[in-house]
């Protein structure tokens, strides 16, 4: 009988996008799958959308992608360097804005 295992506990910040004064920071779930059969084994890895962190003049908020509600506090615990990513993303120029 084939055995399958899925490991999806790792979250990371994706590449931020800044449009005007709004920063969008995607949060990705790293998915690793493996399985074995009678004479075979397989392995695959990828990423899935998990949430989007929005930062604007109104503050920081989180929009979950799936059916489960996601909080900023939860993401701070699970995503290493999230606050540093938000600060760095806020300093980058907006789309169409020249860098100096």
Image (tube, grey):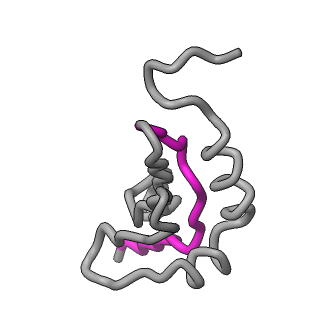
The image quarter in which residue 61 lies? bottom left
Above-or-below relation of 34 to 95: below
Above-or-below relation of 14 to 84: above
39 or 98: which is nearer to us?
98
Residue 53 drawn at (x, y percent): 47, 62
70 lies left or right of 93: left
37 or 100: which is nearer to us?
100
> Which residue is painted at 45% across and 52% down in the image?
47
Q: Residue furthest front?
A: 57
Instruction: Give the magenta part as a residue range.
Output: 2-19
Q: Is residue 44 shown to the viewer in this render? A: no
11 or 41: which is nearer to us?
11
Q: Is residue 57 shown to the viewer in this render? A: yes
13 lies left or right of 68: right
85 or 67: which is nearer to us?
85
Q: Is residue 47 magenta?
A: no
> Which residue is painted at 41% across and 60% down in the image?
52
Q: Is residue 5 magenta?
A: yes
How would you classify the magenta stretch by its main secondary structure? strand
């Amino acid at each position: 009988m084939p055995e399958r295992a899925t490991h999806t506990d790792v979250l990371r910040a994706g590449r931020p996008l800044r449009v005007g004064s709004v920063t969008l920071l995607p949060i990705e779930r790293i998915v690793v799958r493996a399985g074995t059969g009678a004479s075979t084994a397989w392995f695959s890895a990828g990423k899935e959308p998990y949430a989007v962190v929005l930062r604007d003049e109104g503050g920081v908020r989180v929009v979950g992608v799936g059916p489960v509600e996601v909080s900023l506090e939860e993401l701070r615990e699970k995503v290493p360097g999230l606050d540093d990513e938000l600060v760095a993303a806020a300093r980058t120029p907006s789309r169409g804005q020249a860098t100096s």
